[in-house]
Amino acid sequence: MGDPRVVVTRPEADAQALARDLTAAGLQPTVLPLIEVSAVAAREPLDQAWRSMPHYLAVMFVSANAVEHFFSRRPGGMSAFNTASGLTARAWATGPGTVKALLRQGAEATWVDAPLSEAGRFDSDSLWQAVRPQVQPGDRVLIVRGVDGAQGAPAQGDRGTGRDWLSDQLTQVGALVDFVVAYRRRAPAWGPQQLAQARNAAADGSVWLFSSAQALVNLQGLLPAQDWSTARAVATHPRIAAAVRKAGFGVVCESRPVLAEMVASIESIG
């Protein structure tokens, strides 16, 4: 049996980076992005968020895309989440991919709060356990998020309504929560070749890798009549795994979004 075949469903840039890591680990990735990410048309709210940075206790980023698009509006010469910036705001992240994105933007690891590496899950619940001691009544926290589709509904992200749950926790302890939209997500427009690849991967033993429930929703929209009963998948959160099982995938394995653990899960069912 050869190296396991893996379908990477993340947005294009993220998918290509992960595909390189999976190839180095001995797997055979196919990139089929199920989410397209783009900048939002309204830039003033992002500019205002940067101007308001001195007033925030922390900025919570829902994803690596939130980091990239937020920093795309950073004023020239301004930095954040490091000693040199002169700002006190900390960066909050729920997973290792978002932490890496922050470090690429110049954040210092000691200024970034995230679930501990040994945490059972990387989500808003685990993040709250890590940051709760910081928060006092009257503190302000900014949550950087995306919107889905043309109607501008809040992006569900990797953890469903975790963003809203965290906002509720902050409000209950007397903190003030602001939101800013940094990017837009939408379903991709696949051509005949991509559709054929997806149909084949539903039955040829490939392992689908899902790190977003929205990716699954988009897949079902692209292939509404597809039988997934013989398909295999690895999902990076219990909520995503539950959605994949509900969609009819025959074999579903859960893994934290850590490369070594994803590879091990893929190999276990591939």
Image: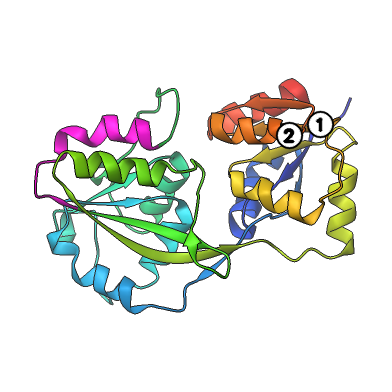
Name the kind of residue labelled 1 in the image: Asp
Against 191, is 235 above or below? Answer: above
Q: Residues within 10 Å of mark 1 (few under 14, many from 20)?
A: few
Q: Is residue 243 visible?
A: yes
In this rendering, the answer to whether 228 lies above or below 190 is: above
Q: Quadrant of residue 180?
A: bottom left
Image side of residue 17 versus residue 119, left or right: right
The residue under label 2 is which amino acid type? Gly
State the extent of the magenta-drawn residues as a range: 124-140
Q: Secondary structure at mark 2?
A: loop
Q: Which residue is mark 1?
A: 3
Q: Which mark is residue 26?
A: 2
Q: Locate residue 245: give its quadrant.
A: top right
Q: Residue at x 79, y 63 (%)?
A: 190
Q: Residue at x 13, y 54 (%)?
A: 88
Residue 175 spot, x, y in % from top left: 16, 47
Say which quadrant the N terminus sits in.
top right
